[in-house]
Amino acid sequence: MNPIIVSITGLGYVGLPVAIAFSKLYKTIGFDTDVHRINELSNGCDRNSEYTQEDISRGTLTFTSNPKGIESAQFHIIAVPTPLDEFKKPDLRSLFAATESIGKILKKGDVVVFESTTYPGATEGNLLPILEKQSSLKVGVDFKLGYSPERINPADKEHTFEKIQKIVSGIDKESLDAISKVYESVIPAGVFKASSIRVAETAKIVENSQRDLNIAFMNEVALICDTLKIDTHDVLQAASTKWNFLNFKPGLVGGHCVGVAPYYLSYKAKESHYSPDLLLKGRHINEQMRSFIAQKTIKEMLAAEHPLKKAQVSILGFSFKENCKDHRDSKVLDIIRELNRQGIKTEVCDPIVDSKAVTRELGLTLLPFEALSRSNAIIIAVNHRQFKEFTPEQLKSISCGNPVLIDVKGMCNPEDYRQAGFRYWRL
């Protein structure tokens, strides 16, 4: 076992896989302020169902909710959430708090690496001063500093932490060399040494912003095709036969990464008096899709002669993406609220998401499929693998009259459902 002790601050979708990977080679301590989360992990339970008890207990990993519990570590990784505030601006409160905690226990010779997504310049301009103030130590003299953006993709069993090349950066050559050596030891895919911390910070948000813009283009194509009464799925299927066509799909863009990164990049661009018009236009298109889907559902129900006054819609899926329990910033919630504002009753089913957490956080009840009432319309909002197993007859069992099926991700065979009596529409 390597003599270096590693600490991971923040044990969510990013921090836990990092901690498990490091614990295979190093004594590793996971720290989180969520006492309930720490108790669960200490008993081998991951509420996100990403890891089994065997995965968690296989290495040297221990857990603590006491910041002093990581004092013995020499290599500190910070991987806490960095969401947006109500004004769509970077919310770094958790990151600042975590940085203060590390600063208070920082020792000479220690290394600090940030993995949390942030805007260019935050590590050196906002976080470093906190570390130096709290520790009374000097970077480059007493401790080393770096940034290595996370690339964790929840529910993705193929692109895991160890299999993805890791970007690493350091405030100086000594920091970069030390950080690279440690990350290389646990990542067989290797590391990419960025030329500076600011480059590494920017690379992270560019990765996600590029995806956001590509999906925005497909969403705009879907809006145009709907106006022209052309099937978007058929268009993309035809276009994808070209060798260099980028096979993105239209849909809802939620979660804690793709829909957040463009705002971090635009925030810093605006500070430098540059207006990132394309970036923000893409965001606007993706944000409006939730309203478009709600309104399209209403139009299809009216076309099927369902009176809205007593209408009910069943919604399948609540997480921000398929086969994932994470419901943070799910755009499905906005569809529900818009339908409710129109006086339409909604029921929601998601067999993966933690229903107790949704009720506690949002006041929304998730129902098992068998408990859903008969509805005028069904929205398949998230294409979980469980939903792919449904037959037209099963969906017909929770439908009434001349039912409408809104297939957001194009999961179903249209002809099968039209033959079963559904009025079918897909994005």
Image (cartoon, helix red, strand yellow):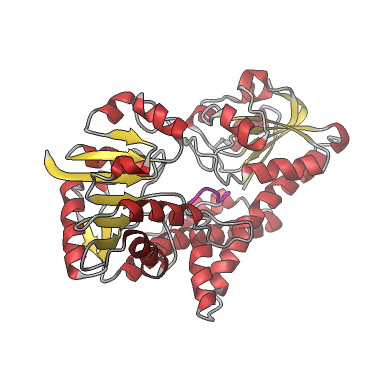
In the rendered image, the residue lying farthest to the front is 136
Q: Nearer the viewer, residue 58 or 373?
A: 58
What's the residue at 40%, 70% (across, down)?
125
Q: Is residue 186 visible?
A: yes
The x, y position of residue 24, in whole percent, is 19, 37
Q: Is residue 160 visible?
A: no
Q: x and y percent of residue 35 in the render?
A: 45, 33
Q: Main secondary structure of the magenta part?
A: loop
**How far across and down, in percent of the image, does residue 16 sit?**
35, 39
Q: Is residue 253 left or right of residue 290?
A: left
**Number of numbered callouts drawn:** 0
At 74% across and 23% down in the image, what residue appears?
374
Q: Which residues are magenta?
A: 252-258
* Relative to 73, residue 212 above or below: below
Which residue is at the front of the view, 144 or 108? 108
Q: For the view shown, which residue lies furthest in the top direction?
A: 370
Q: Is residue 134 left or right of residue 368?
A: left
The relative height of residue 268 versus residue 261 in the rendered view (above or below) is: below
Q: Is residue 146 magenta?
A: no
- Residue 349 or 405: which is nearer the viewer? 349
Residue drawn at x 17%, y 40% as measured from the top left: 25
Q: Quadrant of residue 357?
A: top right
Q: Quadrant of residue 394?
A: top right
Write down the quadrant of residue 398 in the picture: top right
Q: Nearer the viewer, residue 65 or 339?
A: 65
- Residue at x-position 42% and y-position 49%: 80
